[in-house]
Structures are given as C-alpha cells and as structure tokens.
Image: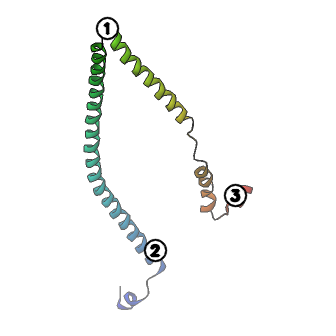
C-alpha cells in the first residue's frame, strides 16, 4: 500500500471485517473464561455432591438403627418382639402412604409456563420486524 492509501478513511468492508474479527475474538475469549470458571465450579460441585451422598447414606443408616432402637424399646415395655417390629414397620408404611398422597397432590399443581409460551411465539415475528398484532392476524 502506498502512503496515500494508508491515510485514507477505511472502507465499510474493512470496518465490517474488523468488527467481525473483534467479535469473534471476544466470543472466543468469553468461552475460554467460562471454561476456566466452570472447571473450578464443577470440581467444587463434585466434592459437594459426594459429601451429600455420604451424608444421605449415613442418614439412611441412622433411620435403620433408630428403627431397631424403637422396636427394642417396645419389647422392653413388655410386647413380643414380632409385634414390636410390626408396629415400627406399620409406622413406616403409614408415613410412606402419607408422603405419596402429598406428593401426588403437589404434582397435580404443576402447570405449563403459559406466559413464556405466549411470548416465545412472538419472537419469530419480532425478528422479522413485524409487530405482534400483525403476526396474530396473519
């Protein structure tokens, strides 16, 4: 290039190419940053999930041991061991039935996100430059 051409204003094509290159570099940098942040988060999340799993296992063990304890206390009160363990088992059956009924009742309350569905249907028309009313009439 000559000295005259380098001092001239850049062309629109050159500006678009530069902007495109800069956007591409920015996106690549953001992706690299996100990857590095996610590595740290995933590692911490994995350790946290493992600790929760161990705590859950210990909780199950506690419930089992507590169940035996309650049954043996009932035996100490004078009831036959079979009846004592049957009473503890019956308690768990009753608790499970209550939890199932409450869970089913809560699941029946789940509804589709109507407002989100309605607004997402308007996006294609908005991208085409049409108003929402025009797309409904069409």
Q: Which of 108 and 50 is in front in this view?
A: 108
Of mark 1 and mark 3, the one earlier in the sequence is 1
Q: In terms of depth relative to the viewer, which is nearer, 27 or 86?
A: 86
Q: How far apart are marks 3 and 2 (CA)?
A: 32 Å
In the rendered image of this protein, does residue 77 appear above or below residue 120? above
- The CA span between labels 1 and 3 is 76 Å
The residue that label 3 is drawn on is: 135
Number of numbered callouts drawn: 3
- Residue at 36%, 18% (x, y): give it: 88
Q: Where does the image place residue 132, in percent across and percent down from the top left?
A: 67, 60
Residue 16 circle label? 2
Q: Where does the image place residue 55, in percent across and percent down from the top left? A: 27, 36
Q: Residue furthest bottom?
A: 4
Q: How crowded is mark 1: few (under 14 residues within 10 Å), some or many (20 or more)?
A: few
Task: Give x and y (percent) for residue 51.
Answer: 25, 40
Residue 138 visible? The answer is no
Tell me the residue at 27%/44% (across/down): 48
Q: What element carries label 2?
A: helix
Disc 3 packing (10 Å; few <14; some 14–19; many ≥20): few
Seen at 31% across and 61% down, the residue is 33
Say which quadrant the C terminus sits in.
bottom right
Residue carrying label 1: 80
Pointer 1 and pointer 3: residues touching (CB < 8 Å)?
Answer: no
Horizontally, residue 47 falls left or right of residue 115, namely left
* Distance of label 2 from label 1 (alpha carbons): 88 Å
Q: Nearer the viewer, residue 13 or 114?
A: 114
Residue at 38% across, 63% down: 27
- The part of the image, by quadrant, that contains residue 124 is bottom right
């Amino acid at each position: 290039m000559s000295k005259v051409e380098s001092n001239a204003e850049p062309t629109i094509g050159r500006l678009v190419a530069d902007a495109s290159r800069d956007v591409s570099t920015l996106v690549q940098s953001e992706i690299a940053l996100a990857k590095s942040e996610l590595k740290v988060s995933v590692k911490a999340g994995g350790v946290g999930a493992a600790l929760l799993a161990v705590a859950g296992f210990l909780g199950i063990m506690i419930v089992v041991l507590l169940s035996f304890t309650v049954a043996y206390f009932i035996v100490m009160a004078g009831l036959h061991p079979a009846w004592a363990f049957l009473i503890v088992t019956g308690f768990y059956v009753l608790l499970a039935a209550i939890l199932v009924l409450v869970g089913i009742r809560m699941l029946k309350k789940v509804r589709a996100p109507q407002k989100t569905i309605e607004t997402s249907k308007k996006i294609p028309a908005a991208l085409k430059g049409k108003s929402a009313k025009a797309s409904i009439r069409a």
